Image (cartoon, coloured by chain):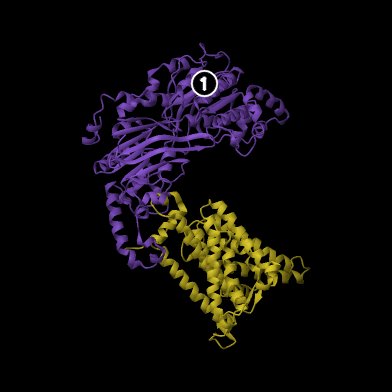
Amino acid sequence: MDGMSILLDGMRAVLAPTCVAYAIAALGLNLQFGFAGLINLGFAGSMASGAYGLAITVSLGGGFWLGLLVALMASGLFSLIVALPTVRLRADYLAMTTIAAAEILRLVLRSSWAKPLTGGVYGLQRFADEFYALNPFGASQYALGFIIVSGRTLWLLVVSWAILALIALGLWLILRGPWGRQLAGVREDESLVTSFGKNTFLIKIQVMLIGGLIGAIAGVILAVDQQNVNPDNFASTITFLLFAIVILGGRARVFTPILGAAVFWLIIAMTDSVLRQLAEVSAASGGWFGQGQAGATRYILVGIVLILAIIFRPNGLFINSGAPLRKVSVKV
Amino acid sequence: MSTTHSDRILSAHSVSRSFGGVQAVNIDEFSVPTGKLTGLIGPNGAGKSTLFNILTGFEPADSGTWQFEGQDISGWSGHRIARAGLVRSFQLTRLVPGMSVLENLLLAAPAQKGEQLSLAGIKSIWKKQERSNVERAEALLSRVKLYEKRHDDAAGLSGGQRRLLEIARSLMLEPRLLMLDEPLAGVNQALRETVMQHLVELRDEGLTILFIEHDMDAIMNLSDYVVCMGGGAVIADGTPADVASSPAVVEAYLGKNNGGTALTSPSTPRSTTEPPRLVIDGITAGYQPGNPILNGVSAEVHPGEIVAIIGANGAGKSTLLKAVAGDVTVSEGSIRLNDEPIERLQMYQRVEHGIGYVPQSSNVFPNLTVLENLRLGGYIDPQKTDDRLAEVLERFETLKPMLQRLAGSLSGGQRQSVAMARSLVGAPSLLLLDEPSAGLSPSAQEIAFEQVQKIAESGIGVFIVEQNARECLAISDRAYVLEQGRIALTGTGRDLLHDERVIDLYLGSLRTRNDTHTPGQAPDKNQEETR
C-alpha cells in the first residue's frame, strides 16, 4: 500500500471546490440545526433551488450575475414556502414536512413536463462560462503544495474560500450577540422564550431563510464547479451527509462545520483510496475484493467512523464534552 | 360589581376551555386585585394551570374575554401579552441549560436592539444597551444572592436557586403583573423563606403577583387575597381566612360530605382474614436517585378489599401506585403480590402476575374504538379474551352501545369506564386506580365509585388513589393517609371519614392558623387592610 498516495488523495479531496461547497452548506445547516434546533431535512431543496435558479436563468438567456440573484431569490422563496406553514410544528413534524418539500422539488425538477425549463433527468449544462471568463489564473496548472490543480479550479477555489470566509464571519457577527442568544433559547425551550415577549415564530423564519440562502450559495458552487445541474445531485442523501458533517465537527459553534467538512472529505477520500488499492491488490491475487465492493464499503466505513465519533466525542470532534453549549459571548 | 381596572389589574369574563369532553376551565368572573399578592388554590385538576395558560396566551380559550390594565388582551399571542407587562413563570423551573446564570437573565431583557436581525451584526449599535442590561441583571442577581454564581452554568443550580433565578429573570422584563405557577415547588426548606420574603418585598414595592400554590402555609403567610378553583370554576374568593372557612373549599378538596347516599362503607372490613394479596413492606421510591418521594411506606391490600390512598398534593399518592405498577423504581423495601416478590419485575411482567393499572390521565387510546381499546386489555391470554370481554361488558353495560365509537369521542366519565373495563379484561387479581373520579361530573363520579365497589365485590383487591377523599373513604374498607412520602394515618374508611385530622392534612395551616396567625414575614400595612 502506498501511504503517500492515500494522503494525497485525502488532501486533494479537502482542497476541491466540492469540499468548500459542503463546508458552506454545513454552515447554513448548523445555523438551523445546531444553533436554533430546527431539524430541516429538506436542506437539499435550498441547494437545488439555488443551483437551478442560476442554471435556468442562464439557459433562458439571462446573464450569470442575474442568475446568481435569481438563485438567491428562488431559495428564499423555497425557504419561506417550506417554513411559514411548518416551523410552528414540533421537531419531528418539521423534519417530515421539510424532507417532503425537498423531494417534491426534486421530482418536479426531473419531471418530463418541466423538461423544457429544467432539462428533466438530464439537467442543464454550461451556464457558468461568464464566471470562468473572469479567471485571472491563465496557466493550465498550479501547485498547491503537493496537489496540482487547474487554473480554472483554482479560480473557483479562491472565490469559494472567500465566500466561505465572508459567510463564517457574518455568522459570527450576528451569533455572538443577543440575536444568537435568542436562538439558543429557542432551541432549548421555545415557550420559555415566548414568555419573555419574544416572537419565536419570526426568529425561526429568519433562521430558515438565512440558512436556506447559505445553502443556495453552496448549491451554486457545486453547480459551477461541474458546469452541470442534475436533480439527482440534490437528493436527500446530501442533506444527511451535511448532518453527518455538522455532527462530526460539532453543533452550535460557528467554525466547527468547516473542520467537519474537511474531516468528512478526508475520511471519504482516504478510505476510498485504501479500498481502491486493496481492490488492485486483490485483482492481482484472485479478485476477492472488486472495485464494486470498494464503493459500497466506503460509506459503511464512514458510517462506522460517525458512530464511533458520536460515542466517543458526543459534542463533535472539535468540541470537548462538558463545554458550554453557547460559547459565543461578547464582552461589553 | 363596579370595579374599575385601576383596582383590578387583570379581569376575565366567561372564560372556558374543554378537552375531549372534560371542562378544564369554566369561569364566570375572575380578577386579580392591583398591588396585592393573590394566591390561587384548588385541588388537582381544578384548572389553575390551564387558566394561567389561557390568560397568558399559551393556550387558546374556547370562549371568553380578559383585560389587563383595562386593555382587552383576549386571544393575544403569548409574546405579545408578555410585552404588555403580564409575565408568567412555569410550574417546573425552566431555564436554558448550557448558558450562564447571567446570560439566562440577559435572554429575558425586553426590546433588545441586538435581537433584531438587521442590527445584530453591528455591535456598536447594541453594545450600550447590552452593557446596561448586564448591569441591571447583575443588580437583580445580587438581590437574590446569585451574583457569585453569575458565570456558572445555570443547569447547576439547586431547585431553590432556580426559583430565585426565575424571579430575578422575570424582573428583567419589568412586569406589572407577575403570574407564578407554584413558585415554591421543588424549593428546599431553607430557601422557601427566602423565596417568600422576595415575593412580599416585591409586593411592597408595588408589583402585583398572582401565584398558584399547594402549600397552605405559604398561602397563609403570603396572600392578601385568595381565589379557590374547583372543577374549572372559581368557587370562593376573599381573604385567606374567608376562603379557608368556606364549605365549598373544604368540599372541593375533600369531596362532598354526603352521609346518606347509596355509597355506604361496609360496616366491617371485608375478608381481612384471608392472606393479603398485596404486601408493600417499607419501600423507598422516587424518580431520581437520591431524591426519594416515598420513604419507608408499608401497606396491604386483601382480596375483595377497597383500600384508599389519600393525602395532599405531592404527598406521593400516585408515586405509590406507580411503584406497585412498576413505573417507578423501588430502591429499598419489597412488594409482594400473591406472596411473590415483584419489586424487581418490569411493568409488563407485573401485569402478567395479576396487576391491572389504570393511570390518571390519557388512559384510553383515543384513535381506537371502544371495542379495540377493550381487546387490548386481553393480550396476556388471547384465547380467553372473548369470554372475558363478554363478562366485563355484563358489568359495564353502558359501554355496549358504544363499542364501535372512537374512544376519543367519549366523555371523561365514559373514558374512565373504558379504562377500568380494559384493565379487567386482563383478569387482574389487584387493580390499581389513579384518581378514577378526576375531571368527572358529580353523577359520573358516583357511577365510577359504584363500579369500583362492584369490582371489589367480585374478589379483586382495589388500591385506589383519590382526590375526592370523602366519597372514596365512604366506599373504602381501609385507607392510608400519606403526608410527604410517609404514612401519617391509617384506619378504616369509616373512621377516617369523620376524622378531623384528615381535613387538617389537606387544609391544615389555613384552618388552624386562622386566628393565631401573626404576619411574621412582612411589614403589614396591606395585610391589616385585607384581614
- Comparing B147 with B318, the one in front is B318
Position of residue A190 measured from the top left corner of the image (x, y, whole percent) = 45, 51
The residue at 47%/70% (across/down) is A167
On-image quarter of the C terminus of chain B: top left
Residue found farthest to the top: B267
Q: Position of residue A197 (x, y in %)?
A: 39, 52
From the top left corner, tell me how far across and down residue B196 is, in percent: 30, 38
- Which quarter of the picture shows residue B184? top left
Residue A150, visible in the rendered structure: no
Q: For this rendering, which residue is in front, B409 or B212?
A: B409
Q: Give the letter of the purple chain.
A: B
Residue B244 visible to an observer of this rendering: yes
Please tell me which residue is depicted at 29% across the width and 32% down the height of the picture.
B221
User: Which hue is chain A drawn in?
Assistant: yellow
Q: Quadrant of the N terminus of chain B?
A: top left
Q: Looking at the picture, does residue A125 appear above or below residue B25?
A: below
Which quadrant would residue B195 be assigned to in this image?
A: top left
Write the residue at 57% across / 22% down.
B451
Q: Is A210 situated left or right of B4 in this image?
A: right
Q: From the viewer's perspective, is A155 left or right of A189?
A: right
Counting other residues with Cα less than 10 Å from the Cα at mark 1, is it few (<14), some (14-19), or many (20 or more)? many
Residue B255 x, y percent position in the rendering:
44, 23
Amino acid at the residue labelled 1 = Val
Query: Image quadrant of residue A20?
Result: bottom right
Q: Which of A241 and B418 is in front in this view?
A: B418
On screen, residue B178 versus residue A137, left or right, reads left
| Chain that bears disc 1 | B
Return the residue at label 1: B307
Residue B524 position (above or below residue B482): below
